[in-house]
Structures are given as C-alpha cells and as structure tokens.
Image: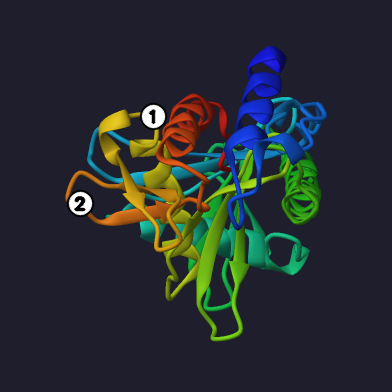
Amino acid sequence: MRRLLTALTALMLATAAAGCVDESTVDTTDTSEALTWADTSSRPSFALWKSSDAQFRFRLVDAKGALLLTSEGYSSRTAALTGLLSVLSNGTTAARYEIKPTADGRALVTLKAVNGEIIGTSGIQATTAAAQATLTATVGAVSTYRTAWATATGRRFAIHLDAGGKYYWNLHAGNGAIVLRSERYDSEAAALNGAFAVLDNGASAARYLVLASSNGGAYLNLTATNGQVIGTSEVYASKANAERARDALIALVPTVVLL
C-alpha cells in the first residue's frame, strides 16, 4: 500500500497543474507517510451499508473495532448520513444519552437528538455498570472522531462550507494535493453522499470524461451512470497528462477511506 501511495503521489504531482504547472518544476518529494485518516486502527470509525431490507444503516466502532452504536434504518443514503452527522453533533454530550434496562435485567444505551429522536443504540450490556462504561466510551469516541476529522491528513475527502452557505468536498491524494473537487450542495449530508458517489464510480475509466479547457489544457469530469458530473479535476497541461491523472485517480479511489 505504501508503494502504491508513493507512486500515486509522484504521478499526481508530476501531472497535476493549477494553471498548467510545467512538469520539470514540480516537487515530487515522497510524502506518502501522511496516512492519518486512512489508518482506522488509530481512531474510531463509521461503517455505512445497505441491508437486505433495502434500508441504509450505520454503526460506530472504536479504534479496536468494538461496536459502540448502531443506527435505525433509513430510506436513503443521504438520510442515513444526516443521522450520522447528528451522532457527531450530539454524541459528545453525556446528557443526550439514556441507559435503558431490559426485561431480563440487562441494559442498553440510546443516543437521542435534541428533539428526542433516537439516532443510535448500543448492543445489550450485561449490567447497568457495563452500559455506563459503554456510554462513557461512546462520548470519548465521538470526540476523538471529530478531532481526527478536523485534523486529518493523507488521502481523504474534506468537507467544507463556503461563504454562501453551501457545502462541497475536495478529494486529497496521499501528499495532500487536491485531485478532484465537487459541485456545491445544500447540506453536509448531501456533500457526503456526493463523496460516496466518487467511491461508487471513480474506479471505472468509463466514468471519466477528458475535456479541453479554454487555455489549451485539459481536465477531467467524473460522472455518474446518469451522466451527472460528480467531481472535476484541476486543469492539466495536456490531454496526455489528464489521461495519466485519470489513471492515477482510478488507482487512488479504492484506497480512500471516507468515514
């Protein structure tokens, strides 16, 4: 994996060009050690999936993979991501949790939004004390996750809010360079869903269009199966450079950890 990121870094830097940088002036220093976000063994992480009932669900696990919270089912991925973001908004506040005893004397933990809606539930714990320990661990995990997201380096998606109140994402390569940018979205959850669309489509050469720019260079559009543009690259000095960047993106996308 380290060799792959080294090669991708060199290729991205040798071909990418904000303003069509001359290849001979590009710094190809190996910075592939910056893998903080991709290393989920050092931080809590979320998984999101579509279950057999066609509902989208997510779960939060700690750095060792221990399950902390699981969501209810949502009818769309964007709705599930809205719930996930609600966990991040509410999960650092102990008062948002409730320990509920079960009929057999055990207990579980629920996390509620400000409106009282349950947004996450723990597994059933053997005792109330164990449930309290899970509550405390979940508060810490959400706090750690938020810090890791805010300070992440390496290959990753970064979500931003622009001056007009719209959200967008940038896809970063292992050296931190931005290699793909999104359109603007009305919500953070919609922007995250757009980033998922990159993972869905970005490993297929057929999903990329190589287009001529007004200054004589070329750039890439990544498209969904319906033709909608998901992300746009920087402008490259030539069509050949854009095609090499496309190939590097095809290799990069499967290695990117979103959540």
Q: Which of the pair 256/83 is nearer the observer?
A: 256
Q: Please rate how many residues cluster around mark 2, counting C-alpha atoms within 10 Å: few if below 14, some from 14 to 19, many from 20.
A: few
The residue that disc 1 covers is 203
Instruction: Choose top left, top right, bottom left or bottom right for residue 161.
Output: bottom right
Q: Quadrant of the C terminus?
A: top right
Is 50 situated left or right of 18 in this image? left
Circle 2 is placed at which residue position? 227
Q: Which mark is residue 150?
A: none
Q: Residue at x 49, y 24 (%)?
A: 251
In the rendered image, the vertical position of residue 137 relative to residue 97, given as above or below = above
Label 2 SS? loop
Q: Tag 1's secondary structure?
A: loop
Q: Amino acid at mark 1?
A: Ala
Q: Is residue 62 depicted above or below 96 in this figure?
A: above
Above-or-below relation of 174 to 181: above
Q: Residue at the left extreme?
A: 226
Near mark 1 (Cα within 10 A), the count class, few <14, some 14-19 or many ≥20, is some
**Quadrant housing residue 205:** top left
x, y percent for residue 159:
60, 60
